[in-house]
Image (cartoon, rainbow, N blue to C red):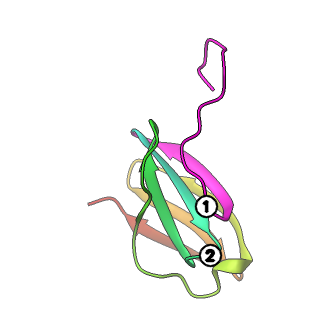
């Protein structure tokens, strides 16, 4: 939804999001169906895998980003993928 109000915009359908973060023009999603972290532009579009497949993704309890990469908790283990 635009910051100034208005109608919500559909960015993508079909992701099984369990965690979500926004950084530098991208939305990062921990996706249950693909067992990976996916990203797509904040304007919407086709998601792309960000980093390797994640073991145990159904247990993700958080997802966040920093200036250096994406971080998440996977079955009690803290994991990260750095931005290139």
Magenta span main SS: loop
Closer to the N terminus: mark 1 or mark 2?
1
Q: Residue furthest bottom?
A: 55
Query: Quadrant location of residue 11?
Result: top right
Residue wearing tag 1? 14
Percent of width and height locating residue 41: 41, 44
Give above or below for 45 relative to 81.
Answer: above
Q: Which quarter of the rendered picture does the C terminus lie within?
A: bottom left
**Residue at left 65%, top 28%?**
8
How many residues crowd around disc 2 within 10 Å: few (fewer than 14), some, or many (20 or more)? few
Q: Residue furthest top?
A: 4
Give whichever of 80, 23 is nearer the camera: 23
Q: CA distance from mark 1 to mark 2?
A: 9 Å
Q: Which quarter of the rendered picture does the N terminus lie within?
A: top right
Looking at the rendered structure, the secondary structure element under dot 1 is loop
Residue wearing tag 2? 33
Give whichever of 3, 67 is nearer the camera: 3
**Residue at left 59%, top 32%?**
9
**Residue at left 73%, top 78%?**
59
Query: Quadrant location of residue 17?
Result: bottom right
Percent of width and height locating residue 72: 59, 67
Give the magenta-colored segment's residue range: 1-24
How many residues crowd around disc 1 within 10 Å: few (fewer than 14), some, or many (20 or more)? few
Give whichever of 69, 51 is nearer the camera: 51
Percent of width and height locating residue 48: 40, 63
Answer with left or right where residue 24 lies relative to residue 61.
Answer: left
Give above or below for 35 relative to 46.
Answer: below
Looking at the rendered structure, the secondary structure element under dot 2 is loop
Nearer the observer: mark 1 or 2; the answer is: 1
Task: Please say if the residues under marks 1 and 2 sit with CB atoms less than 8 Å apart.
Answer: yes
């Amino acid at each position: 939804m635009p910051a100034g109000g208005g109608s919500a915009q559909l960015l993508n359908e079909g992701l099984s999001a369990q965690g979500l973060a926004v950084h530098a023009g991208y939305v990062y999603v921990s996706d249950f169906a693909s067992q990976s972290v996916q990203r797509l532009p904040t304007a919407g579009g086709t998601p792309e895998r960000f980093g390797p497949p994640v073991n145990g993704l159904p247990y993700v309890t958080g997802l966040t980003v920093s200036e250096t990469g994406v971080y998440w908790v996977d079955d009690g283990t803290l994991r990260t993928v750095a931005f290139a």
